[in-house]
Amino acid sequence: MRYNDDEHLRRFGSGTFPTIHDDIFTMFVSNVLGQSVLDLGCCFGLLGERIARAGWRAVGVDALAWQLDKGRAAGVTIPLFQLKVGENTLADLLRLVAEHAVDTVVARRSLCVILAGKQKHEANEPLAAALARGLAERGVRELVIQGMAPDPRAVAALKSVDDEIAILAPAFALAQRRGEVAYLRAV
């Protein structure tokens, strides 16, 4: 089932969160010390909603308005913002981080899309460095990321969580990892 399948919304509507978030949610609740979370590339906002219901303040950001609208219609109550993160909009994302006093970012299989270069097989390293540095400078102390499952056929530049950890390394260091989920702290 794809990440944006309506079945996830049906399950949420019946009181069950999608199991696709279990690994990153478990890593999150086991490690995060922060209080205010940004779900980056949130799709419907279900992971951020799950985090909020567990006691954290959360906001979500996604590039696609229709996904955010479906989340709201299904009952997601966290603030959701439409923003396609890129070189021209990074300042907008960082302003939102500051306005909401975000100290933790979760990103489930979204960094590989956000940090893709003009050619999908190339990473946008300047954007990655600016994102990592900008988050750290605005008080983000923790990242919980879930990378793509390794696939030799993948054309994305960031093919696994290892690639995502490496590209964030100037500002964040690995503290714990389970499979394709990693918990990083600001250095």
Image (tube, rainbow, N blue to C red):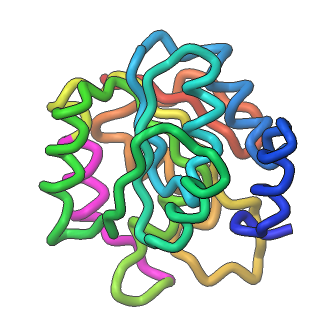
Taking the spot 39% from the left edge, 66% from the top edge, the residue there is 115
* Drawn side of residue 76 relative to residue 17, left or right: left
Q: Residue 45: x, y in percent? A: 56, 49
Q: Is residue 133 left or right of residue 177?
A: left
Point 48% across, 84% down: residue = 120
- Can you tell which quarter of the image residue 155 is in? bottom right
Name the image quarter holding the C terminus: top left
Tell me if residue 139 comes above or below residue 132 in the rendering: above
> Closer to the camera, 67 or 88?
67
Kindly indicate the quadrant of the structure image that contains residue 153: bottom right
Q: Say if the magenta span includes residue 139.
A: no
Task: List x then y, in percent, for residue 102.
Answer: 31, 28
Point 56% across, 29% down: residue: 183
| Side of 156 relative to 129 (left or right) | right
Vertical position of residue 33 compared to residue 80: above or below: above
Bounds of the magenta segment:
121-134
Q: Is residue 75 above or below residue 160?
A: above
Residue 130 painted magenta: yes
Residue at point 67% right, 30% down?
177
Q: Quadrant of the N terminus?
A: bottom right
Residue sitting nearer the eye, 122 or 21: 21
